[in-house]
Image (cartoon, helix red, strand yellow):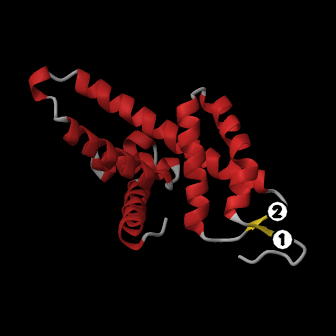
Amino acid sequence: MSLPESDSTLPLDALYGAHHGWLQAWLRRSLGCSQQAADLAQDTFVRLLVRNQPVSDRAPRALLARIARGLVIDHWRRDALERAYLDALGRLPEASHPSPEVRHEALQCLERIAQMLDGLKPAVREAFLLYQLGGLTHSQVAEQLGISSRTAERHVASALLHCYQVCFEGAP
């Protein structure tokens, strides 16, 4: 992506110096936690660094806010996953609780799965989850969702292809 000739670019250090405080305050208002805001502000600039593309001086705050908004959504999703996982663990007998390391790995796996499924249309995601996690047949999925069996098969196949592409080809 090239910039129009009328735009100039900002070096990352200048962007950081000029907008880090604003971004952190904006995140603090969104999250209600200064530590999380500081972490996500840093993550925002890391994303820009990894992206390795010039940043236009026309609307740098809009770009920073867009990246940070995505990171906030990821943060909320991770938090919801962790709460659900810990709630499920709380219903198990104490003796069967996994070690902290296993819990951490499980949460990472759940987060990766959530990221993979995030790119799917809701109907496709629901059909896939009913088939894979619910153990339903294509016909049962179709009946539960009020769609044809063939559509249920296509939804599941589409989701499997999407997951394969995300895992092995790196494309959503």
Mark 2, residue position: 57
- Residue 13, position as x, y percentages in the image: 68, 60
Query: Is 11 left, or right, of 118 in this rendering?
Result: right
Residue under the image location 24 percent in, 22 percent down: 90
Mark toward the start of the polypeptide (2 vs 1) = 1
Of 20 and 67, nearer the camera is: 20
Identify the secondary structure beneath mark 2: loop
The amino acid on which the numbered mark 1 sits, given as a three-letter code, is: Ser
> Distance from label 2 to label 1 (Cα)?
6 Å
Of 153 and 39, nearer the camera is: 39
Picture disc at residue 8:
1
Write down the quadrant of residue 160 in the picture.
bottom left
Write down the quadrant of residue 21 in the picture.
top right
Of 41 and 168, nearer the camera is: 41
The amino acid on which the numbered mark 2 sits, given as a three-letter code, is: Asp
Picture disc at residue 154:
none
Q: How many marks?
A: 2
